[in-house]
Image: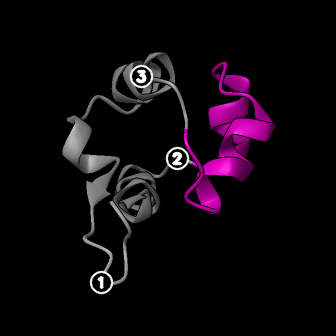
């Protein structure tokens, strides 16, 4: 499962609020979806990296699910 928990820590470290992300062009719906670890586009990840001046791993990480059916 992809989790966006690193995003919130990166935002905190850089003094970025959700409101400022919205003003920078990230849709409020997208932020809400990421707060629930729902899928988002690579374009959004790219935009977040640009806005926050960070790496992909500063926004998201993979966490293995114990009961994942693949």
Which numbered disc, 1 or 3, marks the residue closer to the eye? 1
Q: Is residue 24 above or below residue 5?
A: above
Q: Look at the numbered disc 3 and give the secondary structure of its residue.
A: helix
Name which residue lies at 52% across and 47% down. Answer: 16
Residue 8 in magenta?
A: no
Is 50 left or right of 19, judged from the image as shown? left
Which one is in front, 38 or 27? 38
Q: Quadrant of residue 4?
A: bottom left
Residue contact between numbered discs 2 and 1, judged by CB atoms under 8 Å: no
Q: Is residue 35 above or below residue 46?
A: below
Which one is in front, 53 or 47? 47
Which numbered disc, 2 or 1, marks the residue closer to the eye? 1
Residue 18 in magenta?
A: yes
Q: Look at the numbered disc 1 and give the secondary structure of its residue.
A: loop
Query: Which residue is tagged 1?
Result: 66
Name which residue lies at 30% across and 83% down. Answer: 66
Query: Which residue is tagged 3?
Result: 42
């Amino acid at each position: 499962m992809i989790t966006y928990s690193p995003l919130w820590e990166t935002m905190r470290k850089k003094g970025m609020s959700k409101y400022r992300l919205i003003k920078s062009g990230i849709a409020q719906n997208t932020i809400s979806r990421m707060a629930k670890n729902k899928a988002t586009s690579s374009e959004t990840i790219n935009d977040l990296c640009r806005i926050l001046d960070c790496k992909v791993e500063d926004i998201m990480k993979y966490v293995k699910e114990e009961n994942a059916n693949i």
